[in-house]
Image (spheres, rainbow, N blue to C red):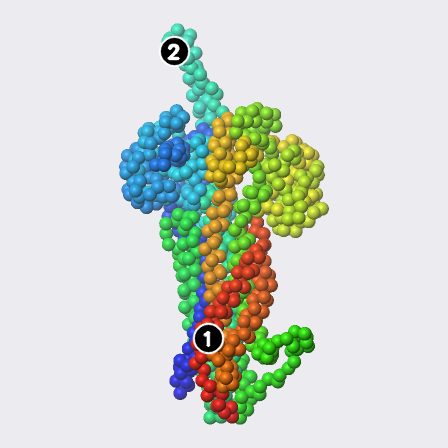
Amino acid sequence: MFTKMTLREIKNSLGRYLAIFAIVALGVGFFAGLKVSKEAMVKTADEYLKKQNLFDYNLISTLGFTDEDVEEIKSIDTIGEAEGTKESDFIYLGSDKVEKVLKAISLPKNINKVSLIEGRMPENPGECLVDKRGFTRADIGSQIKIASVNSKETIDSFSVNKFEIVGIVTSPLYLNYERGSTKIGSGSISSFIYTPVESFTAKEYTGIYATLDKYNPIYSRAYEKYRDKTAPEVSDKLDEVANKRYNRLKEEISEAKEKYAVAQLMGLPVETMDLPEPEKPATYNLERNTNPGYMAFESDSDIVNGIAKVFPAFFFLVAALVCMTTMARMVDEKRTEIGVLKALGYGNNAVLSKYLFYAGSAAFLGAVIGFVGGSYLFPRVIWNAYGIMYDFNNNIEFIFDKAMGIGCILVALAGSMGATWFSCESDFRIVPAQLIRPKSPKNGKRILLERIPFIWEKLSFLYKVSCRNIFRYKKRFFMMIMGISGCTALVLTGFGINDSIKNIAAFQFDEIMLYDYSVSFQSDMASGKGEFLDSVKSHVDKAAFIHEASVDVISKKKHEEVKLIVSDGEDFKSFIDLHNSKEEIKFPDKGKAVICEKLAETFNYKVGDTIKLKDSEHKDLSVEIAGICQNYVYNYVYISEATYESGFGHKPELKTALVNVRGIGEDDRLTDDEIEDKIHKSAAKTMENDEVLGTLVNVDMLNRISKMMGSLDSVVALVIFSAGALAFIVLYNLTNINITERVREIATIKVLGFYPVETALYVFRENFFLTLMGAGAGLGLGKLLHAFVMTRIKVDLIYFQIRISPWSYLAAVAITLAFAGFVNFIFYFKLKRISMTESLKAVE
């Protein structure tokens, strides 16, 4: 009989049953889906990079490498594979007749393997595979010609003068949209191509890619630990290989000069020779974390993980709270039925089983379907959003966390069944005769508003009734306020995350880093400033020469690497604007420093505190903090040249210049694209200087960070949509409870002659005021939740300021009210179906 009664109860109150199911499913799904998203993203990327065998070390020498050098690197015990690569940048005319720079790379064998998307692999020199982001299927069969504007050195570096496109690929070296910078053309590489090594004329390799003998998952502590352990040995071997090659070249030149001298003495006809001494080689051991795409993906997954640390738990808490409230109100509603069953001789456990099954089955089904659906759906939605930026070419891995699944099911069951048991237990202590009779109605009480005559006396009768009803039923009042405020808080937090993340790049490079690009030099430019400025004066307006180095900030409990900027402070504001939210900060005097906000928060520094810096030679410098400036990308410490010299005992090497391009600030007619093109061309011309090692254009950094943060739009949209869906279900459930509990009251109102619209207004007016109060409380709660969530979103080198725009507050309230209005519209028709005969039924 109890089984039939339970099934009949589910059928008769299907809306309530489905509401419990939906709340639990959405709460568990959102919680589980976001929690496993980072793990699923990283595991999928790891599988792809493992399959393509992404390098662990990218070794570069200014003298190049031979096959013997590759074997030397391969002989290191901790190196699994090593492979030489040949690369060359060249200009070609695109289909739009615009000059573009391509990077040609020799086709790899085992390391950094490409993924073929369309076409076939190259079989002969002069055939190539092209970048998926720069070319389409229609380009297969067409040719890429090396433009005549290229230098003779560039043209001679290839054994062919054109390439036939035979396929389209993605490369693990280029995981996202970034293609790097170059010394030719516009200064930025538009796309890459892969071609057989025979397409190059150079005998030497431009670099060596190497992998470790032991594989560890990407971004893992085990990987970083093993890489850090092996890096010194690899760097030492690289220097050894480069020095051997340097000595061989010196010997070859010496032998050639001896033969030349002998030939001259013997009077043999010889051509004039000019054999300069080779320069000492510069070597670079670049690890994976120097790859922009690799590092950007880690930052993106960290942001998703930061959101998942707090937000889903609060989401789940709101869902559980409403679910528990629903079951408690249902048991309260079935008080008379419980009394009848007890009077018929059924024991407490038998009666309890009906309601436990009702609550438990809805919660169990919701938890199971929500967990599986959330674990599958949420990571895929996020992955597809990031698919716009990244080229992994594989579907996201499905992560089924059994422990989390069991935990979610147990919490859902405990919440719904626990509330049911608690409500039934309180009723079981009452004798059946008393249970059969309904509870005495609550006594009417004067409310606070009645004590304010000039407001109360101006309210109409129906508004007075609504006000009394709102505060008369405390459980209903707090249930509505807590449920609605929780949902509004979730929506506001979603909008707030977007506000805090969205404009970081613009704040950094439009308001703080005002220079156009930075230049790195091979040697100290302290005595060569004038000569350099003369060589670039046609396209450079002004430049500031600085010392830039990585130093460690040391405290008793932790240390962190930051960028140290050393300058004479002259006209520094034209290049970097130091300020906080209240005022400008002047460049620090001798013995003082200006640090950025993130660093101050990490170490709990205040103005007037002392900060201790340690350089690469383990020398310490302690300075007083004179100011804390706003900064969003990287961590900086600014000191004067005098401070540096007095602290470290020597003058700083000025091997970096901050440059402002001529003709940009004066001409307001230039478009953003024209300004960007002008900056890139200036950087490319600057690269022609023999002293210049490289340039870094700020607009490229701005675009990179903007795109990285832009990919979060879909994640934020998912959060807001889920919060909105929860708000709808919560409002539906609470309104359903409100109406179900007041059927006789509503029927009586109809008997008194209220029209359908008047009846609806009588009920929904209370809902509207409660929704408004809940939304107002939710704004305060949402501000606190948003601040807490943002403290959990930690990304290396990026600082997120806690900010919520006024429009976000309005949007959160508007969404809550819109859902409330939609729910009221749905229940308007239920109100019309309530029969007036309900009011005539005897209570006894």
Residue 219 visible? The answer is: no
State the SS at label 2: loop
Image quarter in which the N terminus is found: bottom left
Q: Amino acid at mark 2?
A: Val
State the SS at label 1: helix
Residue at 56 percent across and 60 percent down: it is 809
Above or below, 817 relative to 747: above
> Which residue does the numbered mark 1 point to in the structure image?
827
Badge 1 crowding class, 10 Å Cα cut-off, few under 14, some 14 to 19, many 20 or more, is some
Q: Position of residue 661 (x, y in %)?
A: 54, 33
Q: Position of residue 500 (x, y in %)?
A: 55, 53
Residue at 51 percent across and 42 percent down: it is 701
Q: Position of residue 416 (x, y in %)?
A: 49, 75
Residue 269 visible? The answer is: yes
Question: Residue 270's mark?
Answer: 2
- Whole-Å distance between the Cαs marked 1 and 2? 103 Å
Q: Is 396 positioned to the left or the right of 613 in the image?
A: left
Badge 2 crowding class, 10 Å Cα cut-off, few under 14, some 14 to 19, many 20 or more, is few
Query: Contact, CB < 8 Å: mark 1 with mark 2?
Result: no
Q: Amino acid at mark 1?
A: Phe
- Among the 4 quarters of the image, the one containing residue 266: top left
